[in-house]
Image (tube, grey):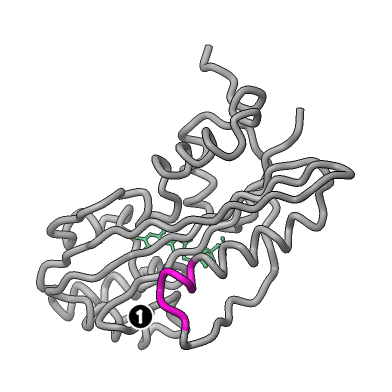
Amino acid sequence: MKPIILASASPRRKKLLQQINLEFQVHASNVTEGYDSSLSPAEVVQTLAQRKALDVAQRYHEALIIGADTIVAHKDTILEKPATYEAAEQMLHELSGSTHSVLTGVTLCQNTFGKDQRVHTFFEETHVTFGKLRSEDITQYVQSGSPMDKAGSYGIQDDFGAIFVKRIEGDYNTVVGLPLYAFYQSMIQFAPEFLATNHPTKQ
Ligand SMILES: Cc1cn([C@H]2C[C@H](O)[C@@H](COP(=O)(O)OP(=O)(O)OP(=O)(O)O)O2)c(=O)[nH]c1=O
């Protein structure tokens, strides 16, 4: 069976992929996540998703490698993972009481031994509206440490998401880090054979 490789260190992405009952291995990439500041948010997430997938794809002759990247975009500013607790508080104050976009880029890279390498990249966008956040709630959430490994300094899957997200428009899983609906549709189009062999029906 040709393996599916998730090129991500994100525990959320691993959990999402486990949800759709695919058999896969995890092999995180170690690429830098810098990008040209002239790129649009959609170009950034697709560029980074592709960079991660192609980095790991070098290590597999026969496999489907999946890379992904998630950012928050608010008023033409890209918010990634916060560097400090202060940066995390600042981001959440900025997002308080407003609507922002969360974009996730995904790359599927299919290596076929001795033949070609086929690459398919797409992105999904979800709009998230926060209620007005109290300073003490922001401080308490940031002190929990949870925001530090998440784009935009928050996890919609955290209790924070449950009490502060007023509404979302788009796939919830795009915000968590992997748009499962669009991903599965892409698998059907791009690599259906991997669904047949790596998708054991639940007993
Ligand atoms: C907005 C948001 C982001 N996130 C997470 C998803 C990603 O893990 C992270 C964005 O950082 P990414 O650089 O996309 O991913 P990562 O560094 O966690 O892992 P890798 O690069 O190895 O794939 O933010 C949430 O878990 N919940 C959310 O609500």
Which element type, helix, strand or loop, lies under badge 1?
A: helix
Residue 36, compared with residue 141, is above or below; it is below
Main SS of the magenta part reads helix
- Residue range of the region highlighted in magenta in the rendering: 39-45
Residue 120 vs residue 96: left or right?
right
Residue 123 vs residue 194: left or right?
left
Q: Identify the residue at horizontal 53%, vertical 11% (top origin).
A: 203
Q: Is residue 44 magenta?
A: yes
Residue 77 vs residue 190: left or right?
left
Q: Quadrant of residue 36?
A: bottom right
Residue 131, compared with residue 59, is above or below; it is below
Q: Quadrant of residue 29?
A: bottom right
Q: Identify the residue at horizontal 26%, vertical 51% (top origin).
A: 170
Whole-percent x, y for residue 11 in the image:
52, 52
The residue singled out by tag 1 in the image is 88
Q: Identify the residue at horizontal 17%, vertical 80% (top origin).
A: 135
Whole-percent x, y for residue 73 in the image:
33, 75
Q: Quadrant of residue 1?
A: top right
